[in-house]
Amino acid sequence: MTYFAVFFYIALTIIRVLTSGDAIRRERKFAIVTGTMIWVIAAIVQFFNNEILLFAMAVTLMILFIYLSFENPKEHFDEDTGTLNKRTFHLMLNDQYDSNKPLLVVSVVMDDLLPIQSVIGHDNVNRLLEQVANQMQLLFSNFVYHSRNNVLSLLLHEPLDEINLKLSQLETYLDQTFKVAQYSFVAKFHIDIIKTKTVKESCDEIYELMNYITAHHQSINGQKIYLLNEAIISQKQRHLTIERMLHDAINHDGLTVVYQPIYDVAKKCFRSAEALVRLTDTQTIGFISPEEFIIIAERKGLIMDLGRIVFEKVCAFSATHQLYNEALDYIEVNLSGIQCVHPDLPRQLETIMKRYDIPPAFLNLEITETASVESGEMLDRNMIDLRKLGCSFSMDDFGTGYSNLSKMSEVVYDLVKIDKSLIWPCFTENNEKSLAILKNMINMLLELNVKIVAEGIETKEMQDFLVAQNITYLQGYFFSRPIPEEEFLHFLDCQPE
Ligand code: C2E
Ligand code: MG
Ligand code: MG
């Protein structure tokens, strides 16, 4: 009976190790396999030599082995959601990644974690994630990891076509109205899938790719299930290249500033300009728009340096040609949302203006509407300090952000720049609504006594219409594209007096 029981247990252990091998960590597997082998050998030896009491010693050894490989299970659990935690996810990914079998990392990402958290509270978000994790476990019969704040992941060894059905069931499940405590709501999820070994990557790269597609899937396309493919990898490569180019440009004078003249309707000439940054390197991957590289600079912590260089170049150019003596009234310089809330910004700009002896009133700082709504107190403080020095401010891209109209009553901007996306639709068919919005917006701004710049003026028709609306300044390709310093000086010289 004893031997039968022993063999039964051994067989069970072996089967268990073989069937759930993927879920067991390598050290633990090694301990179990070695321990079991010692046990089997001891059992066989003892079977033939009944007088040696080897078996008991083997059992002790096996228990010791397994004991040494024990870990505190609490270390692996995420108590908030009842799933396995981030640390375990990393351990298992490293383990299974090395096992050379193709591996699918399937992640359910909750896109609107923060807004939902602010409505239903932190604890209830955890209940929601727990519900989703249970469903994932049920569908895929596999462990679920809370691999990042708003991400639940599975590590699967099945081929992708075999899990398609389960994936679409999961997708349907995620679309439902969730009920947590007294709240019913729909949450926004998407599913990222990374198939390893299809591309040459290391384990670290998988984490990076996971982060990357989570952050960028919306900008790439709006699908719900998102499979990592060559396009994303090359886009990520492009971002890395741009990041490297930015580092180079910042360290080796690879940035230039171009100027787009701004037309003064009353004076009928160009009395100001907007400074726009460009990367000098247009060889590596062609021309890169600042719309693309500014975001990368912001994400990679390079924007303060970039902003400083642009500001310095504008000051140097203005000083060299004494632009503030008659040639121009002011130059507009764009500030990124991150610069706006940097406690060091006023001091940084003041130092540069002093170095080049530029009157601060010559510089108008553009802050986007989105940054102005999102930035809060730090921006207010910076604006007060800079205003004390004499700088003025423009609200850029008006009409594209949150249009916080209540805030407009405390207008702290000298200029408001109406974005081209509000202007262009007025010059298409069925433009009644766009016209109504634009006209009323202009009237509101005029009543608030701010000066208006209309951006993106490309035709005579646009110019005539906006002049009729009493707009103060016009900017756009109709007058001039952004041009390099020398060309800009020539442009100013040639304008009619
Ligand atoms: P923005 O500040 O709204 O600048 C206006 C953009 O509209 C410029 O694009 C300009 O070339 C373009 N534009 C002007 N008139 C026309 C037109 O008639 N038609 C068309 N299609 N486009 C027109 P650019 O230079 O590519 O800059 C894009 C954005 O990048 C800027 O938008 C600004 O948000 C950002 N940016 C540019 N330079 C800097 C900078 O030095 N610092 C920061 N933080 N952001 C910058
Ligand atoms: Mg601007
Ligand atoms: Mg703009």
Image (cartoon, helix red, strand yellow):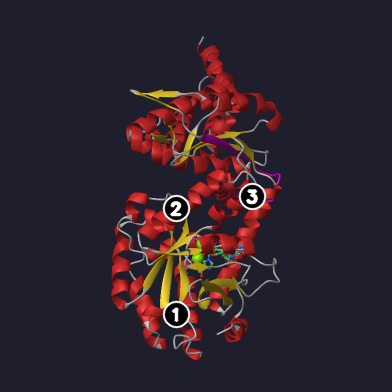
Measure the alpha-carbon separation of dots 1 and 2: 26 Å
The front one of 419 and 460 is 460
Q: Earlier in the sequence, mark 1 or mark 3?
A: 1
Q: Residue at x 69, y 49 (%)?
A: 231
**For the view shown, which residue lies furthest in the front direction?**
468
- Which residue is under mark 3? 428
Residue 104 picture location, percent across and down = 63, 37
Q: Is residue 357 left or right of residue 221?
A: left
Measured as percent of width and height from the top left, residue 341 is found at 36, 63
Q: Residue at x 42, y 36 (%)?
A: 76
Disc 3 versus disc 2: distance between alpha carbons?
19 Å
Mark closest to the chain's N terminus, 3 or 2: 3
Res 15 → quadrant: top right
Is 479 within the magenta?
no
- In reply to whether residue 199 is colored magenta, the answer given is yes
Q: For the magenta stretch, what is the residue range?
A: 189-203
What is the secondary structure assignment of the residue under circle 1? loop
Label 2, on which residue?
A: 441
What is the CA distance from the residue labelled 1 to the residue labelled 3? 34 Å
Q: Amino acid at mark 2?
A: Met
Q: Residue at x 58, y 64 (%)?
A: 463
- In-front residue for pair 481/428: 428
Residue located beneath label 1 in the image? 329
Tell me if the residue at label 3 has its CB under 8 Å from ligand 1. Answer: no
Residue 400 visible, this angle = no
Q: Are marks 3 and 2 in contact (CB under 8 Å)?
A: no
Q: Amino acid at mark 3?
A: Thr
Other residues around mark 1 within 10 Å, as few (<14) / some (14–19) / many (≥20): some
Q: Secondary structure at mark 2?
A: helix
